[in-house]
Image: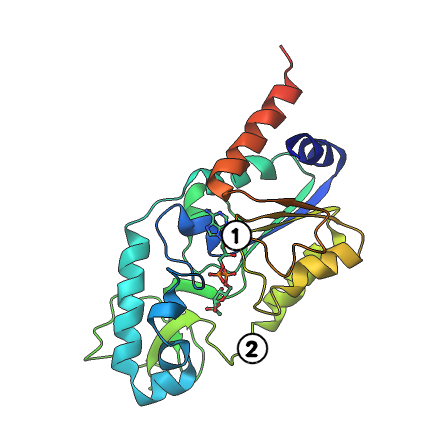
Amino acid sequence: MLDEIVAAVRNCRTCAVLTGAGISAESGVPTFRGDEGLWKKFRAEELATMSAFISNPEIVWEWYNWRRQIISEVKPNPGHYALCDLEKRFESFSLITQNIDGLHQAAGSEDVIELHGNIYRNKCVDCDRQCDTETEIDPDNIPSCSECGGGIRPDVVWFGEMLDGRIISRAFEEANRAQLFFSIGTSAVVHPAASLPIAAKQSGATLFEINPEATPLTEIADHYVAARSGEFLPQLVARLNEVASPD
Ligand code: OAD
């Protein structure tokens, strides 16, 4: 399997990658689903929805402050760094993530397409203006937007909300022109993100999936690697380096 991926990387010029919570799992960020997943412990509709924010903004901010705290204490893992290395091997490389943790950027990836926002940013609940100066939010004293007076919320996509049209369009453009597509560490059940690998494959890409557990995508993937990304991706990079310099 490793050699098939190595050959594909060496033969392709364009590559797109979709990552999910699994790529950050080895950094210590909880995933959403599975036995230890966040949605087992917390009800999504009580925390990550507009109606939750309207009825109980304090609880919502307490939850996001807790997640910010966890994320601020973790570091990128070898999987994140391996993707920075992989990027250099293609004429065109797109990194699309569902994660809001900023760990790809912390590893050195510069142009990350963030489908679901970023937990460190804030915006106004009414006018959508980004309000990044207010980084520390006191749940008992939530600041208001200086333009319109609306409450400040995290700049992440909640359940029932549309993704930013320009961002998702760009992600589909990149998926459609990729010769190689990697789906890494995502349960591939949340759309439209989960449609990206399918679109890539329909446009002719070879589809690789890296995930210790099978997903709805596994059946249509050309190659499925049942492994942790933080272990497999560095092995891939090491093998690519060996092949590039056989001595
Ligand atoms: P999930 O929690 O649904 O899935 C995480 C996936 O990572 C699972 O399929 C695991 O098997 C896999 N996994 C766990 N450890 C791994 C490792 N070390 N290496 C590789 N894979 C590993 O997370 P997402 O698919 O990212 O949306 O969830 C998608 C969206 O659902 C999230 O972005 C979030 C949530 O609702 C919003 O908040 C809008």
Residue 223 placement: quadrant:
top right
Callout 2: CB less than 8 Å from ligand 1: no
From this viewpoint, is residue 97 visible?
Answer: yes
Q: Residue furthest top?
A: 247
Find numbered disc 2 in the image and state the secondary structure of the residue it sits on: loop
Residue 62 found in image quarter: bottom left
Residue 65 drawn at (x, y percent) = 27, 67
Task: Tell me the residue at 54%/31% (across/down).
Answer: 235
User: Could you tell which of marks 2 and 1 lies nearer the N-terminus?
Assistant: 2
Say which mark, if any, is on residue 162: 2
- The kind of residue on which mark 1 rests is Gly
**Which residue is depicted at the point 52% across and 52% down?**
185
Q: Nearer the viewer, residue 155 or 65?
A: 65
Q: Judge whether residue 134 can be spotted in this image.
A: no
Q: Which mark is residue 185?
A: 1
Tag in front: 2 or 1: 1
